[in-house]
Amino acid sequence: MAMQIQGNYDHSGADYAERVKEKLAAEKAEKAKEAEKAEKTAEEKNSGRLSEPKDEYISSEKSGQKPTGLYRVGQDENGNRKIFFDDPKAGHAKEQDDRSEKNEDGKAPKVGGDSQGKPAEKCVTNTDKVDREIKKLKEKKQQLEQQIQSASRDEKKIRELEKKLAQVENELSQKDNDTYRRQNASVSE
């Protein structure tokens, strides 16, 4: 196989190297001009605005300001864990108990509405309907278990009863929990 090259090619090393250098220099100059233009347009956009503030952590020691309040965990006179809030405005620590707050006389405050003087609403949640439904499912489960025991020789009937029993157990596992009771409870005012 013969190969034929057509055309006139200049293979002088000095000319080629100079042309490559000139081409690279022209590309660098053009990139610099584009970068300058991009910088100018960014400056024009931001010329009327202040720079956006950025979040940064400054410790209270470096800022020279007192903290607005501190929470700390401590123990009360009985050894129970409590959360204390050191209020800089009040000048003393307040106790915040995990349980309900109590008045000076040791009794829990009465819930009587909000700060605007409106009376409190009283709601009653009733789960009797859900409880009856769960009780029926448990009875049905017991009946199916008894039927399976009594039908000891009929394999076909046993398989059918076991299928029903599995369905009832599945339904019971979905319904016999607090979440289902809350979702399906009736609420009255």
Image (spheres, grey):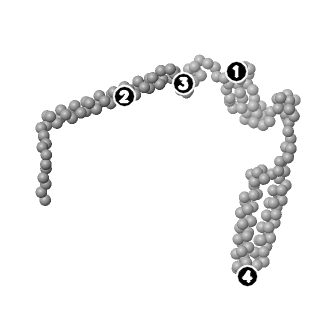
What numbered label is drawn on residue 53? 3
Drawn side of residue 176 relative to residue 70, left or right: right
Quadrant placement of the N terminus: bottom left
Real-space CA distance between mark 3 and mark 4, rounded to the nearest whole angstrom? 82 Å
Task: Give the foreground label among 2 and 1.
Answer: 2
Residue position for label 1: 88
Q: Residues within 10 Å of mark 4 (few under 14, many from 20)?
A: few
Are the residues tagged 2 and 3 within 8 Å (C-beta)? no
Instruction: Name the amino acid type tagged 3.
Output: Pro
Real-space CA distance between mark 1 and mark 3, rounded to the nearest whole angstrom? 28 Å
Tell me if I can see residue 178 in this picture: no
Picture residue at 73% right of the left edge, 69% below the top: 165
Residue position for label 2: 35
Q: Earlier in the sequence, mark 3 or mark 4?
A: 3
Depth check: give the residue in front, 163 or 99: 163
Q: Earlier in the sequence, mark 2 or mark 1?
A: 2
Are the residues tagged 4 and 1 within 8 Å (C-beta)? no
Real-space CA distance between mark 2 and mark 3, rounded to the nearest whole angstrom? 26 Å
Dot 1: element: loop
Instruction: Name the amino acid type tagged 4.
Output: Arg
Q: Residues within 10 Å of mark 1 (few under 14, many from 20)?
A: few
Instruction: Name the amino acid type tagged 2.
Output: Ala
Residue position for label 4: 153
Task: Give the foreground label among 2 and 4.
Answer: 2
